[in-house]
Image (cartoon, coloured by chain):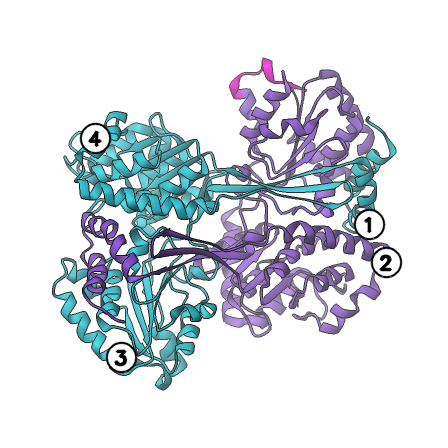
Chain colours: A cyan, B purple
Amino acid sequence: MFDWQQATSEQRSECLSRPAVKVGDKVKAAVEKIIDNVARNGDTALLSYAEQFDARVSPRIRVTGTELIESEFALAPELKSAIDQAYSNIKKFHQLQLPQSKKIETQSGVTCELRYQAIEAVGLYVPGGSAPLPSSVLMQGVCAQLSGAKTIVLATPVKGDCQIHPAILYAAKLCGVTDVIECGGAGAIAAMALGTNSVPKVNKIFGPGNSFVTMAKQLLSQSVPGLAIDMPAGPSEVLVIADKGANPEFIAADLLSQAEHGEDSQVILLASDSQLIEETEAAIERQLSKLSRADIARAALKNSTLILVESIEQAFEISAEYGPEHLILQIRDAERFLPLVKNAGSVFVGDYTPESAGDYASGTNHVLPTYGYSKTYSSLNLMDFYKAYTVQSITKEGLSKLSTAILPLAQAEGLDAHANAVKVRLENNND
Amino acid sequence: MFDWQQATSEQRSECLSRPAVKVGDKVKAAVEKIIDNVARNGDTALLSYAEQFDARVSPRIRVTGTELIESEFALAPELKSAIDQAYSNIKKFHQLQLPQSKKIETQSGVTCELRYQAIEAVGLYVPGGSAPLPSSVLMQGVCAQLSGAKTIVLATPVKGDCQIHPAILYAAKLCGVTDVIECGGAGAIAAMALGTNSVPKVNKIFGPGNSFVTMAKQLLSQSVPGLAIDMPAGPSEVLVIADKGANPEFIAADLLSQAEHGEDSQVILLASDSQLIEETEAAIERQLSKLSRADIARAALKNSTLILVESIEQAFEISAEYGPEHLILQIRDAERFLPLVKNAGSVFVGDYTPESAGDYASGTNHVLPTYGYSKTYSSLNLMDFYKAYTVQSITKEGLSKLSTAILPLAQAEGLDAHANAVKVRLENNND
């Protein structure tokens, strides 16, 4: 237990410091080589990486349409309907976010409009690893589908002689994914950024991944004109604020569900009651023993702290400073504290709102800014799949009235030709 | 004149290629040194750079409040009212964009909301150079003001023994800028990113600048947790689509008002009539001779092409491929072609809508994605000064119904503790 009141300001910032993310120059050099190889050799390079990194027995690039269509028959009915339910909720929530253009006559004869257009081709990355991640497909795929993107590429690695999991394919099918690429890692990112014979070139790449994937996204977004990526990636984290009435078992379960994500996850509890903290510590130990990923969770708990605060208000101040990815409020009448929330990616209000609800199925997006980026970055939302642009239309009379603003400003900025583009129009007719 | 129909596909892509932007390793090394110095020595470093790079006689960091208040009396009345008029139009257009939170019950007992919060502290950069740029203050400052950002820092360099121009100060005052920093370059960017005794630390940095400024924004956004920047920067560009009825003098004036921005500017005309192109060439020569920045414009014209197309529809296809920052439509009944617009930062519709209207005063923002980034990035808009986050609130009954989605997905993904956070709540009460 860390007693906030008794701590020096150095101890306080040490206690909230995040595990350092160090990506070595070796990762960068390796990824540069992969990008270069994909740029030169396209599909051939991709296939060789599938052999090299994923030990694929007979590597291939594209999943067939038949497999996509038939995926639902290979799924346990319970899992199929879970995916259907999650898809429906996520779609409902993101549908609310469909952008609407905005138009105004700012002054007589001068009409300005903000319009939105879907990004035409998007690439979604879904990491492999020990288990399939259909939720990651849904969170990215629903947005892409709602935006009306023409091309939706999904890339995911498959190991050895395994098949791509039907849960991934079924989620992809629901979301209208147009191309499923059975390759992963930096090579797949490069293929989507640059295009190959089998992989369509996309304008923006979304999705989490290991340090190679993250590095590839970064390097390519800096070197391919027009290419964008979703947001900076970092280890996952949760901060729970709990008052005296909270249930230590619930708190422990939330902290552990974050901790099991990875050894670099960070979990923080801010509680105003020392007994609650002690009981939570005990509950963590009890629950840990039953978890299949106990080792990972235990390692993550080393980056983590249970902090005793003076008041719930102080807890919100500390949380704002930290800027957590997930913020869970196990507080009586938690709604009334929402005005105190600052810098959080997603907020879970009340005792019965665990993070795993938002991770999977409530409807909110689980792609969130982490590592303090909640101070500036948004939770993934539908706007990330659009670009906004402006349209303006001015009449001759409108331009004449506007010239009293344009001409002195152009003159002050020393831009003659800017002024001239107005003058030549006012002095001539083209009707 | 470049005849699109007669050209090979290689010649076509050559003709639309952008001037290469090469930022040498020297710039990177120099900027890294500046960032390091500001991190260590704060204000002292800033002051030394003002002496070194701007030849400041008695360098200082902060502009006084009195100077800000009194700036309007130092302004020519015509320029003051031009700034007022531009401010009013820009504010009207951006006010339309104030975000509204969106809430829905995705299924019974499961409420999800998307909320918006202003980014708390923002930094606006306004380059120096041969003339003051009050329009750059307005375009960034109005957004910051409307968002309700608490801290709005403006940094701009001043040369030798000059005073900061009253037009800059007056625009800053209108926009509610809280801190005016009389320093520029990479040092000023570092000061805003890291904070010094005199310069508040900000969360996001906006604004154009030279290669040092751009490099500093890039490097700092990659190294300071939580820090964001506005968008990738590149040379400015315009593409004009004109039909037979267009006025060559108007076209020439628009091309030149882009070309005078800088030697690396690019201007392109797509016209369906060869005579119009010839007349435009002649008009460019005539108008050039009268411009104070004729040398710059002439250099920029070297990166530029007047292209003969087969049809207006083909012109829109070429424009979509190029993705111009500014797109001007000098076409009869231009409105009816708007559905063909793809990948443009800002569109200027009809003969009496010059780019300079949007650069200064119509109301739209002049900070736009360039260098092909209009395929994925937005015109600067109010949302760039906010972050979106989600809030969810679930009842016990809601969680029970949602568990049919959460539990099978958590199981499929091998995340026990995620499932446990639901089970522990359904098996226990905390009411």
Q: Secondary structure at mark 2?
A: loop
The amino acid beneath tag 3 is: Met
Q: Is A162 situated left or right of A206 in this image?
A: left
| Marks 4 and 1 in Cβ contact (< 8 Å) | no
Q: Is residue B419 above or below residue A394?
A: below
Q: Which mark is drawn over residue B76?
A: 2
Task: Measure the alpha-carbon separation of dots 1 and 2.
Answer: 10 Å
Residue B377 x, y percent position in the rendering: 52, 43
Are dots 3 and 4 on a single chain?
yes
The amino acid beneath tag 4 is: Pro
Mark 3 packing: few (<14 Cα in 10 Å), some, or many (20+)? few
- Which residue is nearer to you in this view: B233 or A204? A204
Judge depth for marks 3 and 4 and give the one in front.
3
Determine the residue positioned at 33% across, 40% down: A33
Query: Which residue bears the numbered disc 1?
Result: A408
Query: Which residue bears the numbered disc 4?
Result: A59
Q: Is residue B292 above or below residue B269?
A: below
Residue A426 x, y percent position in the rendering: 85, 36
N-terminal of the two: label 3 or label 4?
Answer: 3
Q: Is A316 situated left or right of B301 in this image?
A: left
Determine the residue positioned at 53% across, 52% down: B215
Mark 4 packing: few (<14 Cα in 10 Å), some, or many (20+)? many
Residue B53 x, y percent position in the rendering: 65, 60
| Marks 1 and 2 in Cβ contact (< 8 Å) | yes
| Marks 2 and 4 in Cβ contact (< 8 Å) | no
Query: Which residue bears the numbered disc 3?
Result: A1
Are dots 4 and 1 on a single chain?
yes
The verdict on residue B4 being magenta is: yes
Mark 1 falls within which chain? A
